[in-house]
Image (cartoon, rainbow, N blue to C red):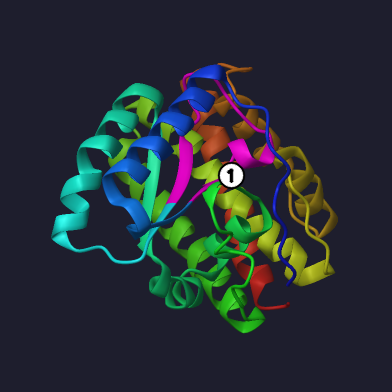
Amino acid sequence: MASSETTAPVLPAIVQEGQARLCAQLVEALGDRLVSVILYGGLAKGEYIPDTSNVNLLIVLDEATVAVLDKAAPIIRGAVRDWSLAPLLLCERDLPLSAEVFPVKFLDMQRHHYVVWGKDVLAGLTIARDHVKLRCAQEITNLLLRLRQFYLQRVHRPELIESTLARAISSFLTSLNTLAELKTGQAVTTKPEIIEAAERIGLDAQPLRDVYALKSGRVKPDTEELKQLYGRFMMTVQQAAALVDTV
């Protein structure tokens, strides 16, 4: 499974300025303890929803002692507050094991990332197909179980049903992209492309389109429509869980 680095994405001004300030502050505070700062996630793929999208940054250190974290903490807290930074902080030596334990996440990061500062620590990671398949199965099955449990707890709160669907769609589409690649050998990038790929491998993709429209604010279903959508979305997740065994 080949890696790639995303070309420089078009970012909102507040994110561009925030990233530059963050890197400068971290370099000043940490010196050569800072290895790299890498953008990944939706912004690295060119997907951004104002007031909704987080800025996913992988911050890699050569070590993460309490003394180092004390220096980094106020800088990172300020960025979380000011421009929706969602930091993932690792030591460089953590990367091989992290990629083995979370292969789907790191495969997605490896495929779609942009080096903001320092070296590209993702390019050389080896991610085994068997690990990807097992983790894909775990993530999809875990989502299915959580969706059932959440419904029992939240059926009386339509706003919580809506927020559950909105949160679930992004991670599920990442898993579906992995599943589609395992099935066909082809990877895609954007969420609409992933939904089309899901349909090509035999899944009912309409609930995915509907939930994605819900998350994007293009539709506002009533309570009964939300419940029906939740049920249809669960059925697609169930189809995907069964399909993993065939790849």
Image quadrant assignment for residue 85: top left
Quarter of the picture holding the C terminus: bottom right
Q: Can residue 180 be seen in this view?
A: yes
Q: Nearer the viewer, residue 115 or 84?
A: 115
Image quadrant assignment for residue 170: top right
Q: Does the magenta stretch include residue 47?
A: yes
Q: Is residue 84 positioned above or below 152 on the image?
A: above
Please state which amino acid type lies under the numbered disc 1.
Phe
Residue, x 49% and y 44% (percent of image)? 168
Q: Is label 1 in a helix, a strand or a loop?
A: helix
Residue, x 20% and y 46% (percent of image)? 71
Please indicate whether residue 3 sits to the left or right of residue 237 in the image.
right
Residue, x 57% and y 35% (percent of image)? 229
Where does label 1 land, which residue? Answer: 233
Q: Where in the figure is residue 234, as x and y percent of width and height?
A: 55, 49
Please indicate whether residue 72 sits to the left or right of residue 136 in the image.
left
Quarter of the picture holding the N terminus: bottom right
Q: Where in the figure is residue 56, as x and y percent of width and height?
A: 47, 42
Image quadrant assignment for residue 136: bottom right
Tell me if mark 1 has few (under 14), some (14-19) or many (20+) residues whose alpha carbon lies within 10 angstroms of its own: many
Q: Can residue 239 be seen in this view?
A: no
Q: Where in the figure is residue 225, as x and y percent of width and height?
A: 55, 25
Q: Is residue 66 magenta?
A: no
Residue, x 60% and y 33% (percent of image)? 211
Q: Is residue 242 positioned above or below 78 on the image?
A: below
Q: Give the range drawn in magenta.
A: 37-58
Q: Where in the figure is residue 158, as x and y percent of width and height?
A: 39, 25
How many numbered discs, if any?
A: 1
Q: Nearer the viewer, residue 235 or 247?
A: 247
